[in-house]
Image (spheres, rainbow, N blue to C red):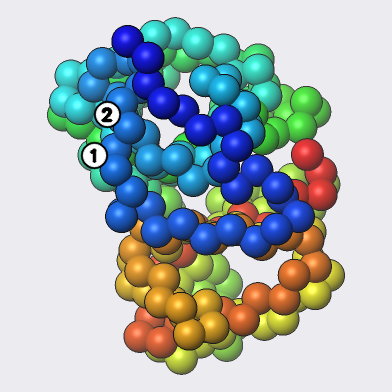
Amino acid sequence: MHYLVPEKLNADLSKPALVHSNSLPWTPSQTPGVERRFLERDGGEVARASSIVRYAPGSAFPRHVHDKGEEYLVLNGVFSDERGDFGKGTYVRNPPGSTHAPFTKDGCIIFVKLRQMPASTKEALVVRTLDMKGAPTSVAGVTRTTLFESETGETVAVETYAPGAQWLDRATHKGEEFLVLEGGLLYGDYVCEEGTWLRFPPGRALPIRSKTGCKVWVKRDHLAVQ
């Protein structure tokens, strides 16, 4: 059976992108029980891509190689492979050349990014954010828990914004990307609720603020090092 997969979707990294993922239909994949909501894509079934992926209870994905790496955040349920079980809030990085055969017992939803790591990435990483100890950094209404930092300057974090907090203008950044996990934020006058994905090219000012408070997954300084 053939499933329609967009080969070009928000593929121009020099342009901003915004997607309300919760309003998108679920598109079946070639694997029974696995469905996707596409956020960005450049290529066919094998592509540089970011997606929200839903696994039905008892579903599994065949063993495969991550030629250019994979990273994902578990949004709901428990996602598993031969290394263990990864519950809600777990952030995982699988480097280029790694393999696994993922599955789920009771069903899950993950946010996944494929083929977006430099070849120099060698180490796997598993961070269970709900179990993290220690005090996160907090500045001007923003609480930040860093999940990953690379030698090239790329960072990944979970940030919580108090009501009225705002992102500062970062005209020198090398790309920023957000997924709203809880609450809502304002991009200008545009309301971005839970499930909204945003991407900004290097150097683009960010007119973003939190009106009633929100929690986001954020990646920074990564678009100039692909």
Disc 1 packing (10 Å; few <14; some 14–19; many ≥20): some
Disc 1 designates what residue?
77
| Whether label 2 touches label 1, CB < 8 Å | yes
13 relative to 64 in the view: left or right: right
Q: Position of residue 106 (x, y in %)?
A: 16, 29
Q: Disc 2 residue type? A: Tyr
Disc 2 designates what residue?
55
174 relative to 135 in the view: left or right: right
Decide: is 199 above or below 8: below
Decide: is 127 above or below 80: below
Using the image as rendered, state which of residue 18 and residue 147 is in the foreground: 18
Q: Position of residue 151 (x, y in %)?
A: 81, 45
Decide: is 222 above or below 137: above
Q: Disc 1 residue type? A: Gly
107 relative to 3 in the view: left or right: left
Q: Position of residue 77 (x, y in %)?
A: 23, 39
Q: Position of residue 37 (x, y in %)?
A: 38, 40
Q: Residue at x 58, y 58 (%)?
A: 17
Residue 166 occupies quadrant? bottom right
Q: Is residue 131 visible from the viewing direction of this image?
A: no
Decide: is 169 above or below 107: below
Quadrant (top left/top right/bottom left/bottom right) for the N terminus: top left
Q: Earlier in the sequence, mark 2 or mark 1?
A: 2
Q: Any mark on residue 90, and which?
A: none
Q: Is residue 1 visible from the viewing direction of this image?
A: yes
